[in-house]
Image (cartoon, grey):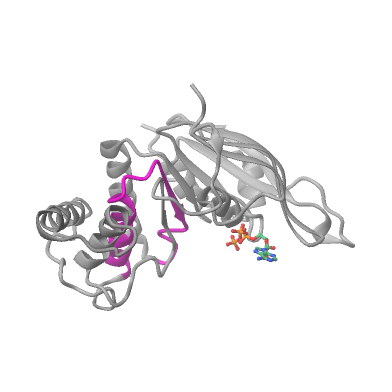
Amino acid sequence: MSALVELRDVWVEYGDKIVLERVSLQLAEGGFVAVVGPSGAGKSTFLRLILGQEAPTRGKVLLGGTPMRAECGPDRGVVFQRYSVFPHLTALQNVLFGIECAGAPLIARLFGARRREARDTAAAMLAAVGLEHSLHVYPAQMSGGMQQRLAIAQALVKHPRVLLLDEPFGALDPGIRLDMHALITRLWQEHGLTILMVTHDIGEAFKLGTRVLAFDKRRHDPHAPHRYGATVTYDLSLDRKTLPPPALVEALGGTDLPQRDLA
Ligand SMILES: Nc1ncnc2c1ncn2[C@@H]1O[C@H](COP(=O)(O)OP(=O)(O)OP(=O)(O)O)[C@@H](O)[C@H]1O
């Protein structure tokens, strides 16, 4: 069986600046892959490649064995750290909009029984993320955690083959982050999702991921930092006993022990 996502010797360059180089990897269906690396290592660029927002300058990106279309499709959902939701729409309207776009791409509006069905689906998705009492609330009236729950509902309602999360919990307070960890783990298990999550928090990566990818530069030219790009420096499949290698913790400038359950 082919991998859900495959990168073959992918490079991303802007002019003479190399951001990513020689990235080859496969992502299996059903995995929860956490992506870490120092700031500027190309983690978001990697996510944008899989989202179809960015095309490789060399190499290939395949989705389900076929070359990725250079556009964001409904088969990929995305949640960013902030601003993933439409501020002028209520929670229900935000999620409903996603269903209407998929069901009626030209006018983004459904009518009659189809609209009622879509409304029920949107309300059920909001209940699944714990927002059943906030259907008619606007994002500006919500806490950061509620907005991220809404963004996740909005992404999931289209049943994406891959859910891409770019620092989704980075702006949240520690307690709310723990609630969100529990939520995303439950949704991943219940919906059989394939998740790719960028995080700056190595503890979060090792707690949630079934696999951790670290991006960094293998080669440096101090006189021309743009000359070499980042690539995958660690690719770790995790079981419950896996701890981050000390060299990786040091590379990320962190000393925190991961919160992985080692019982
Ligand atoms: N459109 C662009 N033109 C030129 N350079 C770009 C462009 N987009 C990204 N870059 C550069 O690519 C590099 C990687 O950026 P990217 O945002 O992918 O890194 P990152 O690992 O996600 O960083 P962070 O952890 O700080 O969010 C950076 O040096 C950035 O300046």
Specify the quarter for ligand 1: bottom right
Quarter of the view holding residue 16: bottom right
Residue 167 position in % (x across, y down): 47, 58
Instruction: Please state if 231 lies on the left or on the right of 130 as rendered.
Output: right
- 56, 243: nearer the viewer: 56
Is residue 165 magenta-colored?
yes
Relative height, residue 212 to residue 254 (above, below) = above
Number of numbered tags placed on the structure image? 0
Q: Residue at x 61, y 51 (%)?
A: 37
Magenta stretch bounds: 144-171
Instruction: Please state if 239 lies on the left or on the right of 25 as rendered.
Output: left
Residue 123 position in % (x across, y down): 15, 57
Q: Residue at x 28, y 71 (%)?
A: 143
- 253, 81: nearer the viewer: 81
- 252, 164: nearer the viewer: 164
From this viewpoint, which residue is outermost toward the right? 223
Q: Residue at x 30, y 65 (%)?
A: 107
From this viewpoint, which residue is outermost toward the top? 1
Quadrant assignment for the C terminus: top left
- 167, 106: nearer the viewer: 106
Residue 115 position in % (x across, y down): 15, 58
Residue 73 position in % (x across, y down): 44, 50
Is residue 193 magenta-colored?
no
